[in-house]
Image (cartoon, rainbow, N blue to C red):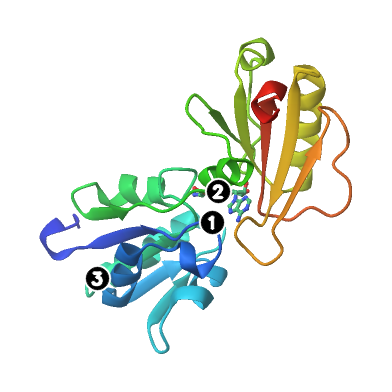
Amino acid sequence: MGIDSDRLSITIIGCGPGAFEYLTEAGRRAIRAAEVLVGSARLLDLHAAPGQETIVFGSDISGTLEQIERSLTRRAVAVLVSGDPGLCSLARPVLRRFGRETCRVIPGVSAVQAAFAAVGVDWLDAVILDAHHALPLTDTEALARREKIAVLGGHREALAWIVRLGGRLGNGYTVVVCEDLTMPGERIRIFEPGAPIDGPVASRTIVLFLRKELLS
Ligand SMILES: C[S@@+](CC[C@H](N)C(=O)[O-])C[C@H]1O[C@@H](n2cnc3c(N)ncnc32)[C@H](O)[C@@H]1O
């Protein structure tokens, strides 16, 4: 059976990098108006009202899409994503499955924006790499011509890849490791390229490679 888009409404809401106050007023209103909220356990804990129906989104994307479809036949659904929906989020599979005519997207503050804001550097011309989902295939020579590189990814494999990338990019860069931005445990540390990133690192970590002169 096809999807009847007249009856359907999905709002995809960017909830910002972490802290509650980084959710926009537009996002807050859309959450209040939704009958079913879909999101990670953390986002649902933070934003769902008592009694609001929720669907916890885990790693099973197709299972979550099926649940959204079942809910849609009855009610307005809001999908909560961290940061901005336009960057490595559930928004892409939701838009592909249900179509742009069915979905409204409310932007949010991305972790990338928060990271560049934390160091006071603009992000025009920045290259954004996603090591969160899979290690990126990169052309180091082309990357080494860029002044600003942001890499998403806080797990062990991503961090090992980031350290190796630093070694290949060389000394012209400062490495800024940003953990849990906007949250109570926020930590920002500076490393030399290729130096090990020591200690436990937050699963929410973004690493910036910035040409040294940008921070001088
Ligand atoms: C699935 S992606 C989601 C990105 C999100 N849509 C955005 O615009 O920020 C998750 C990655 O975002 C980054 N991230 C999300 N929140 C963060 C935070 N508060 N501090 C640092 N990095 C964060 C981490 O690199 C994490 O691996």
3 or 1: mark nearer the eye = 1
Give the camera-side residue of 21 and 92: 21
Density class for disc 3 (Cα within 10 Å; few <14, some 14-19, many ≥20) is some
2 or 1: mark nearer the eye = 2
Q: Which mark is residue 114?
A: 2
**First in residue order: circle 2 vs circle 1:** 1
Residue shown at 61% from the left, 46% from the top = 118
Ligand 1 closer than 8 Å to label 1 CB: yes
**First in residue order: circle 2 vs circle 3:** 3
Q: Which mark is residue 17?
A: 1
Ligand 1 closer than 8 Å to label 3 CB: no
- Assign a secondary structure to mark 3: loop
Q: Which mark is residue 76?
A: 3
Q: Amino acid at mark 3?
A: Ala
Where does the N terminus fall, quadrant-wise? bottom left
Ligand 1 closer than 8 Å to label 2 CB: yes
- The Cα atoms of the two marked residues, 2 and 1, are separated by 7 Å
Would residue 26 appear left or right of 195 to someone viewing this image? left
- The Cα atoms of the two marked residues, 2 and 3, are separated by 30 Å
